[in-house]
Structures are given as structure tokens and as C-alpha cells.
Amino acid sequence: MTNELIDFTLVSVAMLAIGIYGLAVKRNFIRMLFAVEIIINAANLNLVAFGRFLPHSGGQTLALFSIAIAAAEVAVGLSLIIVAYRMYQNIDIADFRSLKG
Amino acid sequence: MADAAFLALSVITIGSAIAALELRSLIYGSIALMGTLGGIAGFFFLLDAPFVALFQLAVYVGSIAVLILFTVMLVKRELIFKKIEDKRRKFAGIGLMLVMMVALGAVFLDSGIKTITTDEPATNFRDIGTDFVTYYWPTLILMGLILAGSVTGALVLAKREDVENDQRAN
């Protein structure tokens, strides 16, 4: 195998940083969901890469669990977007005033 | 050293991750997100994990990306193209991203991860199946319950209460 563990880890770090940038800067609800998806995928890549190189089957098993839970999270997140859009006619999170503490 | 397929996949993945966040239209953004998810599936193929790669393609590219695309279509047209962000905040965010990349990258490059190599055969997908039904079976059941609960919750949340039944029939 010519690819090493460090290569996959560095790609994962880059994706984590991009996702955190998206979460910090964007105020669009749907874009923030994109950023969360990117971070989750960075984590899955790390799980599978370490599982391949250690080697252990637990990495792939946990990655499968993580993908399934992410699917559930996206379903709930998108329905929250629909509800918030129906209430405020907007997807800017600064407008969701009733969610402020 | 990484090979050509790895380099191409990382350019596609990271480039479309940036595009997903920065493209003006949310529709093109969600298509770029599909590119990121597909690129990750390619990495899983490179890591000799074809089962996880196909699961990723079926669940992420097949269902989640399409779900996001349909949600984007439910939003008003001018909101899809409107960019809502602060200039100063954006520069701070780019700074945070670069600091994070350099700091975490330096930590990983300095650690012992660099020396890990393997000649062992890849994990067989039979081992994953055995894992699922032996050690992880309570987790598997819990995951099924969570999925059912979240889908029910999503349906309840998205249900319209201001529409009467006879209106719906019309």
C-alpha cells in the first residue's frame, strides 16, 4: 500500500478545519448543516483509516454506525429547517429570535 | 508517499467541500456536497473498505444529498441565492481555519503516526458482520430504535397543523 496513514489524517484535518470555518462564518441554516456533514465525514475517514492501519475491524464497524446515526441527524435537522422556515419565512439563524435564551 | 489516485481524490474532496460552503447558489452547493461525499467514498475504496464505501454511496450520496436538495427546493427562490454573512467574521473564520489546519497538522506530523505502516491483509467484511451480531448487537438494536424515533420525530415536526383534513383532500 503506497498511501500512508498520515496522508489520510491530513485530509481529515483539512476537512475538519473547513467544516469549523463553515460553522463559525455562515448564518444560513442549510449551509451550517453542510458544514456539520463535512465534519462528520472527516471523522468517518479517520475511523476507517486507523482501522485499516492498526489493523482492526472495529474501525469499519463504528464508521457504519456513525453513517447511520448521521442519516437520522440529517432527517431531524432538515425537518427543523422546514419548521423554522414556515415560522419565520427565512433561513437566517439570526432571525430565529424565539430560540434565543 | 501518496499515489496519483489519492491526490486526485483529495483535490476533489477538499475542493468541493470549499465549493459547497462558498458557491452562491444553495442548489449548486448541495451538488458540490455530493462531490465531497463521493470523494470520501473513494477514500474508503483506497483503504480496502468496499463495504463501507458502498454504504456511504447508498446512504449519503443516494439519500441524504437528495433529501437536502429537496429541502433547498422548498425554500423561497431569493433566499437560495442570498449570501448572509459578515465580512469581518469571514476573515476571522478563515484565520481560525488556517490556525486549526497548521496546528493540528503540525501535531500529527510530529507524532508517531508517520511511522505506522502495515502489510496485513484488509479487514474482511465477514468480520464486520460478525462484529455486528456478537459484540455490538445491543448497539445495533439501539441504533434501529434511534433511526425509527428520529424518522417519526421528523414527520411529526414537519406536519402542518394549520391545514384541515378537508383542505388537504382538495
Image: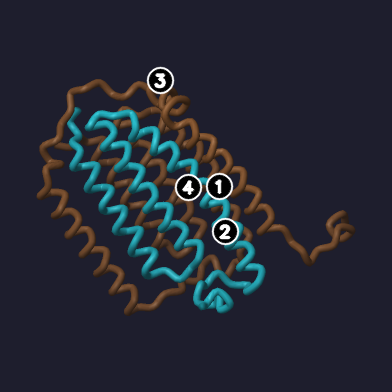
Q: Residue B156, located in which quarter of the rendered image?
A: bottom right
Task: Give the amino acid type for the residue marked by disc 1 in the picture.
Answer: Val
In the rendered image, residue B151, in percent from the top left (x then y), is placed at: 62, 47
Label 2 vs 3, first from the N-terminus: 2
Q: Which residue is mark 3?
A: B126
In the rendered image, residue B109, in percent from the top left (x then y), is placed at: 13, 49
Q: Which residue is mark 2?
A: B72
**Residues under numbered marks 4 and 3 in contact, where contact means CB atoms less than 8 Å apart:** no
Give the label, 2 or 4, closer to the camera. 4
Q: CA distance from mark 1 to mark 4?
A: 15 Å
**Residues under numbered marks 1 and 4 in contact, where contact means CB atoms less than 8 Å apart:** no
Q: Chain of mark 2?
A: B
**Residues under numbered marks 1 and 3 in contact, where contact means CB atoms less than 8 Å apart:** no
Q: Which residue is mark 1?
A: B66
Q: Is B140 placed left or right of B14 in the picture?
A: right
Identify the residue shown where x is 39% and y is 52%: A38
Q: CA distance from mark 1 to mark 2?
A: 10 Å
Same chain for the residues at labels 4 and 3, yes or no? Answer: no
Q: CA distance from mark 2 to mark 3?
A: 39 Å
Q: CA distance from mark 1 to mark 3?
A: 30 Å
Q: CA distance from mark 2 to mark 4?
A: 19 Å
Indicate the chain coloured brown by its letter.
B
Q: Which residue is mark 4?
A: A70
Q: Residue B72, located in which quarter of the rendered image?
A: bottom right
Task: Give the amino acid type for the residue marked by disc 4 in the picture.
Answer: Ala
Task: Give the amino acid type for the residue marked by disc 2 in the picture.
Answer: Val
Identify the residue shown where x is 47% and y is 51%: B31
